[in-house]
């Protein structure tokens, strides 16, 4: 092999940088640092999960040469699986909710995957849900392997053996809290376990969007019905077995608008080209920092890239149409047409003020 090269693209997963935030946290006494996971080759932290799930399935004899990987995904796990599958000759079928961005769908198809779109606003047990459809496809497809990230221990294990040791080596364990969005629970459970084994006083903080069931369940013990929200990739409408809630010290709730506005700020003020759930994580970290009595050093995991949300979070028209941005002060044609007609005033060279 040539000096400085790697044997295939999967060897480029990991070793993502940790960056200090400077401008969006100017009013905080605490320091906030971010782990920039969109610098993985397929664009998210789920590259680590995809690689570990496939390696584990191969080792267990669950994935045969030429087999088909099937997964219910919001997009990032699918991309991680598809990238690894491309290097190993596997086929992929991904099932996604219809609220996900077109960029995510197009990326999966670019890898050669088949993508099936299902309604978002249905119960997990509904036969139309993306969970149910994925399970049915596994039963109907010869030589199929169900990645099943919501219940596969290889998901949190990916972060226990990859993300967390990498963070520990980079930081020397010199941080007081670790903050991440709450989705499958893989990141919080895997990283949280690793960090707690080394320093019990490190706080593990989850961030949950309004509409998801985690926050209410953790705070009250009640399993309430989830409702729709716009931020992608975090929050759940059921409890995955990959989420170890006992590892959590706190949970912070965020809404769609503050997630998206913070995401835009991270790009425009910090130069960090990250996605919507990244804004959620940073907003959650800021809220957590404001609740502290003493300044702390807080590390936040940023899952993915702005590239996957250009048609949504970074599209002013989409943001306005969903109530996340005020009307453009410069006005659009529609805006101008709504204005009341004004009396025309004429002047000549004899007119005085």
Image (cartoon, rainbow, N blue to C red):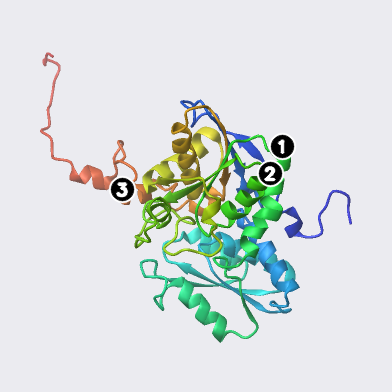
Q: Position of residue 89 (x, y in %)?
A: 72, 73
The label nearer to you, 2 versus 3, is: 2
Question: Image quarter for residue 52?
Answer: bottom right
* Residue holding disc 3: 323
Q: Can residue 41 be seen in this view?
A: no
Q: What residue is rendered at 44% in x and 34% in y?
A: 291
Q: In this view, does 257 lie to the left or right of 270?
A: left
Q: In this figure, which residue is indicated by the disc labeled 1? A: 172
Q: Which of marks 3 and 1 is in front?
A: 1
Find numbered disc 2 in the image and state the secondary structure of the residue it sits on. Answer: helix
Q: Where is residue 205 in the image (x, y as percent from the top left)?
A: 51, 45
Q: Is residue 172 above or below residue 102?
A: above
Secondary structure beneath disc 1?
Answer: loop
Q: Quadrant of residue 203?
A: top right
Please give the name of the residue rendered at 70% of the width and 50% of the height, measured from the top-left corner. Answer: 14
The residue pinned by badge 2 equals 198
The 10 Å Cα crowd at callout 3, few under 14, some 14 to 19, many 20 or more, is: few
Q: Position of residue 328 (x, y in %)?
A: 31, 39
Quadrant holding the C terminus: top left
* Residue 290 is at least partly visible in this image: yes
Task: Judge the density around disc 2: few (<14), some (14-19), many (≥20) Cα neighbours within 10 Å.
Answer: few
């Amino acid at each position: 092999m040539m000096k400085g090269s790697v044997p295939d693209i999967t060897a480029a997963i990991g070793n993502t940088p940790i960056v200090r935030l400077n401008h969006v946290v100017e009013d905080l006494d605490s320091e906030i640092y971010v782990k920039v996971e969109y610098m993985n080759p397929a664009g998210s932290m789920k590259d680590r999960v995809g690689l570990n799930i496939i390696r584990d399935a191969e080792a267990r004899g669950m994935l045969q040469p030429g087999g088909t990987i099937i997964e219910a995904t919001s997009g990032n796990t699918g991309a991680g699986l598809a990238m690894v599958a491309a290097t190993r000759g596997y086929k992929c079928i991904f099932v996604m909710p219809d609220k996900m961005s077109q960029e995510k769908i197009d990326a999966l198809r670019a890898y050669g995957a088949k993508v099936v779109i299902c309604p978002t606003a249905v119960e997990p047990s509904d036969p139309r849900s993306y969970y149910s459809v994925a399970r049915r496809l596994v039963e109907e497809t010869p030589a199929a392997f169900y990645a099943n990230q919501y219940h596969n221990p290889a998901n949190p294990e990916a972060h226990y053996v990859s993300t967390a040791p990498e963070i520990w080596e980079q930081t020397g364990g010199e941080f007081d809290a670790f903050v991440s969005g709450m989705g499958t629970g893989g990141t919080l459970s895997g990283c949280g376990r690793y960090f707690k084994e080394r320093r019990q006083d490190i706080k593990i903080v989850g961030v949950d969007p309004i509409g998801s069931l985690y926050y209410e369940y953790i705070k009250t013990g009640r399993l309430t019905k989830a409702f729709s929200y716009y931020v992608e990739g975090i929050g759940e409408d059921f409890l995955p077995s990959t989420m170890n809630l006992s590892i959590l010290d706190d949970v912070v709730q965020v809404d769609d608008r503050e997630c998206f506005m913070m995401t835009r700020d991270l790009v425009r003020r910090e130069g960090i080209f990250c996605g919507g759930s990244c804004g959620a994580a940073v907003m959650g970290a800021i809220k957590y920092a404001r609740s502290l009595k003493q300044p702390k050093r807080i590390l936040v995991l940023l899952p993915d890239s702005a590239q996957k949300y250009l048609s949504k979070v970074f599209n002013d028209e989409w943001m306005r149409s969903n109530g996340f941005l005020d009307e453009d002060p410069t006005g659009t044609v529609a805006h101008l047409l709504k204005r009341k007609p004004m009396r025309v005033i004429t002047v000549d060279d004899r007119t005085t003020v």
